[in-house]
Image (cartoon, rainbow, N blue to C red):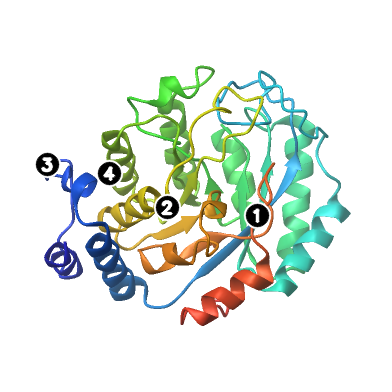
Amino acid sequence: MKKLAKDIIDGRRLTRKDNLSIFANADAKELAEGADMIRKAYCQNRVHLCTIINGRSGKCGEDCKFCAQSASSQTGCETYDMLDEETILRDCKEKEAAGVHSYSIVTAGRSVAGRDLDKLIKIFKRLHKECNVHLCSSNGLLSYEAFVRLKAAGVETYHENIETSQRNFPNICTTHTYEDKIEKIRLAKKAGLHVCSGGIIGMGETWEDRIDMAVSLSELEIFSIPLNALRPIPGTPFGELPPLTEDEIVRTVAMFRYINPTAYIRIAAGRAYFKDGGKRLFTSGANAAITGNMLTTIGNNIREDIQMFAELGYDVTPEK
């Protein structure tokens, strides 16, 4: 695998035409070491930290089987309408002071439109004026006009996970399609936004599905790829799925680095599976993280994350 890593460092790119089944059976230690070689060659020791706020929670009409916020799930998750401007501004300033690089407003629901979109735009304009962080938004299947407005308000990145492979997507969600997501990714790019897109492993998918997702994201030229290891939530359709092992998560993260050598491979939910808090992942190809609390699960502490990255030799200062 180190020979393949060196080839990728020298400019080779893996495609669907290559024999990608090697990732399922390669020696895990060699795979991780090769992924870290690629990460160091293309991304050096930069790390990117993003935090999110649940700007509108619950009562979502979509039926994503992993999600506590779906109206079809019985989780008792907190529900509320769009948070007010001052609450979000205060949170953003606190997270900026703590050392994060990006701040994202995430909203439950298929999309955001009308008064809620107007409110969101107003909030982002305020954040852009008063804070000095990279702004990201994650608001579902928006219109092209909404993407244009977000860009004008100071948002730099739009987040739209593809979640899994095209083949497996109908097993995850039936109220919208994989093709819907691809369309919105392309519209966000057309509006001038960067796109952050990844998915979740541990939802009953095959290794072929994981590889297909990694290749699809490469083909879409995604610059930031968040990877979640499913933490089954009781009350959701996937609430009883078995947990993933550390080795399986590491193998998946390393594979994503081989196929997406220049991207941020961003670790999101699932670090709690690791006895060391996921430290191992950041010597196996990953170079970015969601830090702070997740949407409906507890996340890693920002201060502790910054300390961990410093111990690993990463540069945690904001990019100029």
**In the image, is 285 to the left or to the right of 88?**
left
The crowding category of the residue bearing disc 1, from other C-alpha atoms within 10 Å (few below 14, some 14 to 19, many at least 20), is: some
Residue annotated with mark 2: 246
What's the distance in space between the residues labelled 3 and 1, CA to CA?
38 Å
| Marks 3 and 1, the one that precedes in the sequence | 3
Residue annotated with mark 4: 215
Q: Residue at x 59, y 61 (%)?
A: 50
Question: Viewer-nearest of labels 2 and 3?
Answer: 2
Residue annotated with mark 1: 299
* Position in image of residue 61 (x %, y %): 66, 20
The crowding category of the residue bearing disc 3, from other C-alpha atoms within 10 Å (few below 14, some 14 to 19, many at least 20), is: few
What's the distance in space between the residues labelled 3 and 4, CA to CA?
11 Å
* Position in image of residue 164 (x %, y %): 40, 34
| Marks 3 and 4, the one that precedes in the sequence | 3
User: Which quadrant would residue 179 be assigned to in this image?
Assistant: top left
- Secondary-structure class at tag 4: helix
Residue 239 appears in view: yes
Which of 116 and 80 lies nearest the eye of the viewer?
80
Three-letter residue code for mark 3? Lys
| Marks 4 and 2, the one that precedes in the sequence | 4
